[in-house]
Structures are given as structure tokens and as C-alpha cells.
Image (spheres, helix red, strand yellow):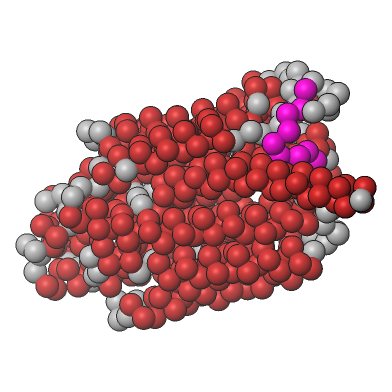
């Protein structure tokens, strides 16, 4: 009788824990929803936005500004959540993201939009790493693959709706509504989190590494500016570009010195002594470069070269994201059942490499069907890799380092996305200066530039309607040639990620969580 009662009590307690986990997880899924919509809604509309507010040469600044802000915020997000709690910081991120969305929708010019996207990125810098840290707190590594697979699926599900909806909204209303639509979703997310997310928090005193954050963000900013401006605004050998790279090197060297002497460094260099941590973060940088390269440059090819509308270019991204959902869920289930993950990572990277190789061979004769096939292959690979590297890092981290290790992985992704977009954007804009000239006469190029057109004319139906067919065809040929090295440049990046993944030591996944969802931790004693 006693055994039966004990079993019943245990079952009831377990159900309470499961309900606590799912309540927390619901809030995280909503946060992931608005973050993923931020990328996928806007991506198909970017050619339209730059055609209205600025030239194609500034294309990459819109996503880069958000990634740069996220890069600055991510390193301190985990530390601040240890002081003030995961829930308040997570809600702060959503509020900041909503403010940035409203400002983006009201943007009167291009550079105000870049600033507003910076605010949005700051909000994402709290949302993304803290969602992973909360999962790391309440779910064991062995079970975490299943939940992180569902997180990846939520990203993919929102991504399926996002491109098609983003294209439809842009074509039938205005691109400004792409940002306004985030506001009601953010409000619902805040309500759910306020009432239902009960995350245990062991508050600890911390010293915020201000100088570490300043030197890191300053160094990355200088490198990004030099990469984007080099060869366009200023010659590569100019004092402006050389000076920016030199300043970036000095600031990053200063960052290393600060981290070696700070009592609580924003990015503890001791973490890099672990080969698992180091190789996983290097690979995460490569995966982020590839993912955002696909999300933000495929619409340029689909609209500018193939000639699809904004709505169709959004819809044509859907198969890639469906494939990502399938392998994200299946991969998470496989990891939870077997405890093995390295093989999945290698298969995913190989698929991504094959997909980008196909993209690098495309030209003006490429069909929608060929494009979809390549995107499906890339999506299958992304689904197997995107969340798994975070799992690998969390499994090797102690409880005390969980938040900062997770934030470091998110930082690697943000840095990879920002630097990757800067490099790929530079390759595209510099390539266009010579590629279009191969297909159009000097007088035709000069006439386009004086009329404020250029390559962006193929994105604007009003401009395209007034272009002679031969001119429009020349622009499409030139844009295809300029995009060829953009996709080709991602192959060596994926190859590096593949090689370092080979050296990741696969260790057994723990089957215990650090804390229990739904239970409050008081002080350092750990008493409920």
C-alpha cells in the first residue's frame, strides 16, 4: 500500500514538473517565434526596401545592424540574467525588440531604418541566448535534444509562414507592416511569460565586465565597417580602411588583455581551453555565415535574376525551411534516443556544402525548380546543425558556466552572421561594378546611374517597366555573375566547419538537469 502511494505521489510530482517545463517552454517558443519572424518576414522584402530607401550597395547594412547589436548584447545577457534573473531579462529583450520593430516601421530614411534594426538586434541579443540558457537550466542534456529540436522546429515553422507572408504584405500593402506585425505577437508573448513562466533563479553577485564589452563590441564594429566600406566608399589601401582594421586589431587585443585580468570576464578565456567548446564555436560561426547567407541573398537571386515577384520569392524559400523543420525534429529525437550527435553534424555540413555548390553554378537560365532543389538540400543540413552545437557546448559546461557558455555560443553565431553578411555583401557590391559592365555599354551604365537605377531597377516594378528589355537582361546577367562568388565563398567556410567538427570529442550526454522547472531556488542554499 505504501509502495502504491509512493508511486502515485512520484507520478503526480513528475506531472507537475512536466507541466512546469511545458509552461516555461511555451514562453520560449513564443520568444523564438518573434525572433525568427524578424528575419524571415523581412528577408524577401529587402530588395524592395533598398530600392526605395537606398542603393543595393547598402543592402547588407539592414541585417548587419541587427546582428551587430546582438553581438554587443549577447556577452552580457547571461551575466545580467544571473544577477537579475532569467525572466526579467528575457521580458526586457522582448520589450526592446518591440520598440525596435515600431521604429523600423516608421523609418523615414535608410539610415534611420538601420538604427531601428540596431535596436531590434539588441532585443534579440537578450532573447536568443537566454532562451537557450533557460532550457539548459531545466532540462537534462539527454532530453534536451528533443526540446531543442522543437525550438528549431518553431523557428522553421515561423520561417515557413514568414517569407510567404512577408512577400505578400510587401506586395499588397507596404514593407512597413512587416515590422508592425511584430507588436501584437510581442504583447501576447509578454502576457504568457508574465503569468506562466516560473524559472528558478539562483541569484549571485557579479561584477559586470564593462571594459570587456566595450573593447569587444568596438573591435568587431571597426572590422565590420572596414569590410563593408573597403573598395566602395574608400580604397582598400586608404588610411580609413587600414586605420579601421588597425583599430579593430588593437581593440580586440585589448579585449584579450581585459579578459585575462577581469574578476568576472564577459567571455572567460578559460572556456577556450576546452577543445569541445572551441571547435563547436568555430563551427557555429561557419553555420551562421551559411544560414544568413542563404536567408538574405537568395531573395536577391530569385527576384533580381530569375525575375520572380516579392511574394513568389518569399514562397520559394518555404521548401528550404520545411526541410529544416523535418531534420531539426528528427535529429533532436535521434539525439535524445541514442545520445549521439557528431555524425548528424557531419552529415548536415556535407548537405549544406552540396547545396551551396549548386547555388554557385546558377545563372539567368536557372529555373525555380532547380533553385528549390538546392534550397531543400541546404535546409536539411541547417536543421541538423543549427541547434546541435549549442547542445554540445551545454553538455560540457558546468552549472556555474551554463549561461556564459550558452551566451558565448550565441555570440559566435551573431559574429558569424554579422561578419559573414559584411563579407558576402562586399563581394556582391564589388562584383556588380564590373559584372554589369560586361553586358551593358558604358553609356547605358552611366544613364542608369544618373537616373538612380542601377541593379536595383530589376527589384522595382515601376523602374523595370521603363527599361528596354536588353538593358533589363544585361542587369540580370550582371547580377547573376556577381552572386556566383557570393555563394562560392561559403564553400571553404563550410569546409572549415566540417574539419573542426571532426575534432570534436563526442562525450556521453548527461541525463540530469541542473535545476527543476517550477521550483524556486532561494539564495545559494538551493532550498525550494
Residue 514 covered by magenta stretch: yes
Residue 46 appears anywhere in the view? yes
Residue placed at 8% from the left, 64% from the top?
465
Question: Residue 80 at x, y = what percent?
Answer: 65, 25
- What is the x, y in percent for residue 271? 80, 41
**Residue stretch in magenta:** 513-522
Depth check: give the residue in front, 205 or 468. Answer: 205
Left or right of 136 on screen, residue 464 = left
Tell me if residue 82 comes above or below residue 469 in the rendering.
Answer: above
Compared with 447, 235 (above or below) is: above
> Which is the main secondary structure of the residues drawn in magenta?
loop
Number of marks: 0
The residue at the far right in this view is 2
Q: Quadrant location of residue 217?
A: top right
- Where the C terminus falls, by quadrant? top right
| 92 shown above or below 436 | above
What's the residue at 67%, 59% (across, down)?
A: 146
Name the residue furthest left.
Answer: 466
x 59%, y 69%: residue: 327
Tell me if 218 is positioned left or right of 337 in this view.
left
Residue at x 92%, y 51% (from the top left corner): 1
Q: Position of residue 155 (x, y in %)?
A: 50, 55
The x, y position of residue 50, in whole percent, is: 26, 48
Q: Nearer the viewer, residue 292 or 59?
A: 292
Observer-nearest residue: 476 or 226? 476
Determine which quarter of the picture holds residue 207.
top right
Q: Does the magenta-highlighted stretch encompass residue 435?
A: no
**What is the residue that sits farthest to the front in this orientation?**
1
Amino acid at each position: 500500500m505504501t509502495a502504491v502511494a509512493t508511486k502515485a505521489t512520484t507520478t503526480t510530482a513528475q506531472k507537475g514538473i512536466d507541466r512546469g517545463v511545458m509552461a516555461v517552454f511555451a514562453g520560449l517558443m513564443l520568444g523564438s517565434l518573434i525572433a525568427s519572424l524578424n528575419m524571415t518576414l523581412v528577408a524577401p522584402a529587402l530588395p524592395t526596401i533598398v530600392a526605395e530607401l537606398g542603393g543595393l550597395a547598402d543592402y547588407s547594412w539592414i541585417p548587419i545592424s541587427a546582428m551587430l547589436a546582438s553581438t554587443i548584447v549577447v556577452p552580457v545577457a547571461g551575466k545580467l540574467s544571473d544577477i537579475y534573473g532569467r525572466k526579467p531579462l528575457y521580458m526586457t529583450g522582448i520589450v526592446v525588440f518591440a520598440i525596435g520593430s515600431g521604429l523600423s516601421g516608421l523609418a523615414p530614411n535608410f539610415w534611420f531604418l538601420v538604427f531601428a534594426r540596431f535596436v531590434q538586434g539588441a532585443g534579440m541579443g537578450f532573447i536568443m541566448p537566454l532562451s537557450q540558457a533557460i532550457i539548459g537550466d531545466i532540462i537534462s542534456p539527454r532530453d534536451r535534444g528533443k526540446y531543442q529540436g522543437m525550438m528549431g522546429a518553431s523557428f522553421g515553422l515561423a520561417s515557413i509562414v514568414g517569407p510567404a507572408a512577408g512577400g505578400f504584405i510587401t506586395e499588397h500593402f507596404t514593407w512597413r507592416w512587416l515590422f508592425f506585425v511584430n507588436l501584437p505577437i510581442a504583447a501576447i508573448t509578454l502576457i504568457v511569460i508574465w503569468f506562466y513562466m516560473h524559472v528558478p533563479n539562483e541569484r549571485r553577485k557579479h561584477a559586470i565586465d564593462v571594459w570587456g564589452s566595450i573593447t569587444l563590441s568596438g573591435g568587431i564594429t571597426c572590422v565590420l565597417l572596414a569590410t563593408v566600406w573597403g573598395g566602395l566608399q574608400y580604397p582598400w589601401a586608404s588610411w580609413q580602411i587600414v586605420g579601421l582594421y588597425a583599430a579593430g586589431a588593437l581593440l580586440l587585443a585589448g579585449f584579450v588583455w581585459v579578459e585575462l585580468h577581469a574578476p568576472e570576464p564577459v567571455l572567460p578565456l578559460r572556456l577556450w581551453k576546452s577543445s569541445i567548446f572551441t571547435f563547436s564555436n568555430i563551427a557555429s560561426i561557419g553555420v551562421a555565415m551559411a544560414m544568413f547567407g542563404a536567408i538574405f541573398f537568395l531573395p536577391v537571386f530569385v527576384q533580381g535574376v530569375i525575375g520572380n515577384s516579392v511574394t513568389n520569392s518569399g514562397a520559394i524559400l518555404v521548401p528550404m525551411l520545411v526541410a529544416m523543420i523535418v531534420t531539426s525534429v528528427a535529429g533532436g529525437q535521434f539525439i535524445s534516443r541514442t545520445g549521439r550527435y557528431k555524425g548528424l553534424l557531419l552529415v548536415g555540413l556535407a548537405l549544406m556544402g552540396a547545396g551551396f555548390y549548386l547555388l554557385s553554378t546558377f545563372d539567368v537560365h536557372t529555373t525555380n525548380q532547380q533553385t528549390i532543389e538546392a534550397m531543400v538540400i541546404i535546409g536539411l543540413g541547417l536543421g541538423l546543425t543549427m541547434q546541435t552545437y549549442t547542445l554540445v557546448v551545454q553538455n560540457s559546461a558546468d552549472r556555474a558556466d551554463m549561461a556564459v557558455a550558452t551566451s558565448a555560443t550565441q555570440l559566435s553565431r551573431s559574429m558569424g552572421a554579422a561578419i559573414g553578411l559584411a563579407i558576402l555583401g562586399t563581394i556582391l557590391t564589388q562584383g556588380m561594378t564590373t559584372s554589369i559592365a560586361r553586358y551593358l555599354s558604358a553609356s547605358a551604365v552611366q544613364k542608369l546611374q544618373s537616373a538612380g537605377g542601377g541593379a536595383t531597377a530589376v527589384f522595382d516594378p515601376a523602374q523595370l517597366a521603363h527599361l528596354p528589355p536588353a538593358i533589363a537582361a544585361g542587369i540580370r546577367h550582371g547580377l547573376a555573375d556577381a552572386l556566383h562568388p557570393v555563394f562560392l565563398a561559403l564553400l571553404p567556410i563550410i569546409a572549415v566547419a566540417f574539419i573542426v567538427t571532426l575534432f570534436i570529442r563526442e562525450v556521453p550526454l548527461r541525463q540530469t538537469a541542473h535545476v527543476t522547472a517550477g521550483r524556486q531556488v532561494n539564495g545559494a542554499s538551493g532550498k525550494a
